[in-house]
Amino acid sequence: MDIDLLFYEGGAWDSPTVTLPHPRWSSREFVIFPLRNLLQAPTLAKHPAWASLATEVRSLPVGGQGLRAWQGPTPWIQTP
């Protein structure tokens, strides 16, 4: 399992084992695409703490690698 921590509430962190924000988050479409959608949620879109990140994410290129929001069923979630 590989877990990439993107951001840290306290700002930045740099140690031999962890760097936050993740140093390459802004070049990874699989991060940008869902983050862009998440930051459009009404709760986050209106909150000033997320404004600069939302502006930065909107300016990053996305496309060309077949990324799209999943609209189908989720087979790992059982429906009653």
Image: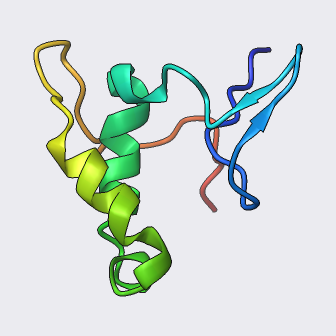
Task: Tell me which residue sits at (21%, 35%) in the image.
Answer: 60
Q: Is residue 27 above or below residue 33?
A: above
* Left or right of residue 60, residue 37 in this image: right
What is the quadrant of residue 15 in the picture?
Answer: top right
* Left or right of residue 80, residue 37 in this image: left
What is the quadrant of residue 27 in the picture?
Answer: top left
Q: Is residue 27 above or below residue 43?
A: above
Q: Quadrant of the N terminus?
A: top right
Look at the image and name its color scheme: rainbow
What is the quadrant of residue 38 in the picture?
Answer: bottom left
Q: Residue 50, how many percent across, how many down?
A: 44, 70
Query: Which one is nearer the viewer's eye here, 33 or 19?
Result: 19
Q: Residue 64, how many percent across, how many down?
A: 11, 15
Task: Tell me which residue sits at (16%, 43%) in the image.
Answer: 59
Q: Is residue 23 above or below residue 65?
A: below
Q: Residue 68, how many percent across, how many down?
A: 22, 33
Q: Quadrant of the C terminus?
A: bottom right
Q: Residue lying farthest right?
A: 16
Query: Which one is nearer the viewer's eye here, 78 or 3?
Result: 3
Task: Tell me which residue sits at (40%, 48%) in the image.
Answer: 35
